């Protein structure tokens, strides 16, 4: 197994003792609700800013902006090669010392980032033959790799030590900077290149503040320690995660790149408007998994039953949350798109109605992926991601030339469904779903009750229809009693913490 190859890497320390169930719950509750609640205003602001970007740029310029981000994004793994996931897991288990790794990771990532900038920009110009404006946009995105070479290791140490509250605050600083400067860029009519630069300005600030926090919390001293002898072993141990990350990025951005090669910028804009709206709805999954992955890494090998219990509870909560969102959004897709983005983006309605079904599939496959990372199954996970990426490539090659942006949406949903099935095959023997009726069926029944309630109201004002659905679904779900006492305590704890933090923000 990968983690046993320690002949060159820094010394390992014993696995940490597990905290009690109550303490583990408090940690999960603190980190997840902080991720959700402390910056909820920023999340709303970020959503509104995304809508403003789409409206202000228009479908053609927004398409070019999206294509530049996608092309650089596919190959961004060159600047990291999977070290983020590997080192987070190792530090969380107490097997690697943060001080011995931090500056070595920074050095390796700076070297890799330089290579990535050259390779990605050169391929965009000489191989794909994008126009100079697009190549410049791709180059500017790649410059961000150098900045993330410092921010990435900082975030690793905070997350591995279960201080997601601090890392999410720093991520918020990056987002505030982007929204503030990006708004000035759009108001003054600058090109999408200015928007790309605006997205990078907060990264060095967050990295510097993160280093200060790490020292203040005594998570590491971060004294300069550089040992090139460990670089090769570090890279080799990280490669399975590099393959995983590359296939994820390919599945995320390949459709946009293919659209940029085969279709018009307007079609890219229609597709990405719906795509970005869809994937803004993954915040619950993000909040849960950023906490669960290091926590389950600590559990595995000490208490597999706790991993299994955590997996089942997380699966149920993610499905119960995401299924009604998918169903309701599919029913309201067209009026929702026009309300947010104007008639110019009306073709995005059908895309949203299709793409939204990738949300429950993605939430669950991401959970499974996190479990494989935490339980030393990254090689099996890499095979799953590779197969899913190949299926995504094949389906896009068929669907995009024939059906354009609609074909890309169908391909995305198919890919997520395949990934979920393959992941569950990897996990089901060790971590099976133990209560399918409560985990899967009851949320579907509650969702259908919600759909029956809002279907007669589709011609009513959108806000009223959404409000009816938001009331009917939880009432129907709780009437069906799918949650056990421990899960109800989690839900009540999250709700109480969110309300308390929102009140604190309102008071301030």
Image (spheres, helix red, strand yellow):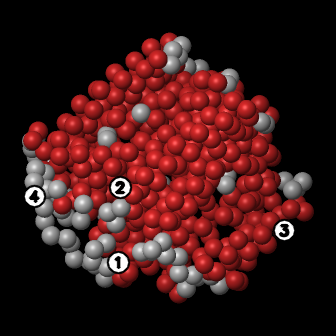
In terms of image quadrants, where is residue 29?
Answer: bottom left
Label 2 to label 1, Cα distance in Å? 19 Å
From the top left corner, tell me how far across and down residue 426 is, in percent: 45, 65
Residue to which mark 1 is pinned: 304
Q: Residues within 10 Å of mark 4 (few under 14, many from 20)?
A: few
Q: Residues within 10 Å of mark 2 (few under 14, many from 20)?
A: some
Residue to which mark 3 is pinned: 452
Label 1 to label 3, Cα distance in Å? 41 Å
Foreground tag (3 vs 2) = 2
- Establish if 504 lies above or below 299: above
From the top left corner, tell me how far across and down residue 31 is, in percent: 40, 65
Helix, strand or loop status at disc 1: helix
Per the rendering, the mark at residue 11 is 4
In terms of image quadrants, where is residue 92?
Answer: bottom left
Label 3 to label 4, Cα distance in Å? 60 Å
Per the rendering, the mark at residue 364 is none
Helix, strand or loop status at disc 2: helix
Depth check: give the residue in front, 430 or 332. 430
Q: Is residue 484 left or right of residue 28?
A: right
Marks 4 and 1, the one that precedes in the sequence: 4
Label 4 to label 1, Cα distance in Å? 25 Å
Disc 3 vs disc 2: Cβ atoms closer than 8 Å?
no
Marks 3 and 2, the one that precedes in the sequence: 2
From the top left corner, tell me how far across and down residue 473 is, in percent: 72, 71
């Amino acid at each position: 197994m990968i983690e046993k190859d320690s002949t060159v890497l820094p010394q390992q320390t014993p696995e940490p003792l597990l905290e009690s169930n109550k303490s583990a719950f408090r940690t999960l509750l603190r980190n997840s609700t902080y991720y959700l609640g402390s910056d909820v205003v920023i999340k709303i602001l970020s959503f509104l800013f995304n809508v403003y970007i789409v409206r202000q740029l228009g479908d053609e310029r927004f398409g070019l902006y999206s294509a530049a981000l996608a092309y650089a994004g596919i190959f961004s793994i060159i600047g990291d090669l999977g070290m983020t996931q590997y080192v987070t897991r190792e530090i969380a288990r107490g097997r690697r010392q943060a001080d011995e790794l931090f500056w070595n990771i920074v050095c390796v990532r700076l070297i890799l980032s330089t290579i990535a900038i050259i390779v990605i920009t050169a391929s965009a110009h000489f191989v794909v033959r994008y126009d100079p404006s697009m190549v410049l946009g791709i180059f500017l995105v790649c410059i961000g790799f150098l900045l993330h070479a410092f921010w990435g290791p900082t975030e690793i140490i905070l997350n591995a030590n279960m201080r997601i509250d601090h890392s999410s605050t720093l991520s918020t600083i990056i987002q505030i900077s982007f929204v503030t400067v990006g708004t000035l860029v759009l108001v003054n009519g600058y090109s999408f290149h200015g928007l790309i630069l605006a997205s990078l300005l907060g990264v060095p600030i967050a990295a510097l503040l993160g280093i200060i926090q790490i020292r203040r919390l005594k998570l590491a001293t971060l004294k300069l320690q550089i040992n090139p002898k460990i670089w090769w072993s570090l890279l080799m141990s990280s490669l399975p995660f590099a393959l995983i990350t590359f296939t994820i990025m390919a599945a995320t951005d390949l459709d946009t790149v293919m659209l940029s090669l085969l279709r018009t910028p307007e079609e890219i804009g229609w597709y990405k408007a719906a795509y970005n709206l869809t994937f803004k709805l993954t915040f619950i999954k993000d909040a849960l998994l950023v906490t669960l992955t290091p926590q389950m890494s600590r559990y595995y090998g000490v208490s597999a039953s706790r991993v299994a219990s955590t997996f089942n509870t997380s699966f149920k909560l993610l499905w119960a949350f995401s299924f009604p969102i998918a169903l309701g959004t599919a029913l309201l897709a067209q009026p929702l798109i026009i309300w947010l983005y104007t008639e110019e983006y009306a073709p995005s309605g059908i895309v949203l109605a299709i793409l939204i079904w990738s949300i429950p599939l993605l939430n669950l496959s991401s959970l499974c992926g996190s479990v494989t990372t935490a339980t030393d199954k990254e090689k099996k996970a890499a095979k799953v991601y590779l197969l899913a990426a190949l299926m995504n490539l094949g389906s896009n090659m068929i669907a995009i030339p024939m059906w354009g942006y609609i074909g890309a949406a169908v391909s995305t949903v198919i890919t997520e469904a395949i990934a979920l099935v393959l992941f569950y095959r990897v996990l089901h023997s060790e971590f099976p779903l133990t209560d399918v009726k409560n985990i899967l069926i009851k949320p579907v029944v509650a969702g259908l009750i919600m759909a029956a309630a809002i279907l007669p109201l589709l011609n009513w004002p959108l806000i009223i229809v959404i409000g009816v659905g938001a009331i009917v679904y939880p009432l129907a779900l709780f009437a069906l009693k799918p949650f056990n006492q421990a899960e109800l305590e989690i839900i009540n704890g999250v709700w109480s913490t969110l309300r308390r933090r929102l009140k604190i923000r309102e008071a301030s």
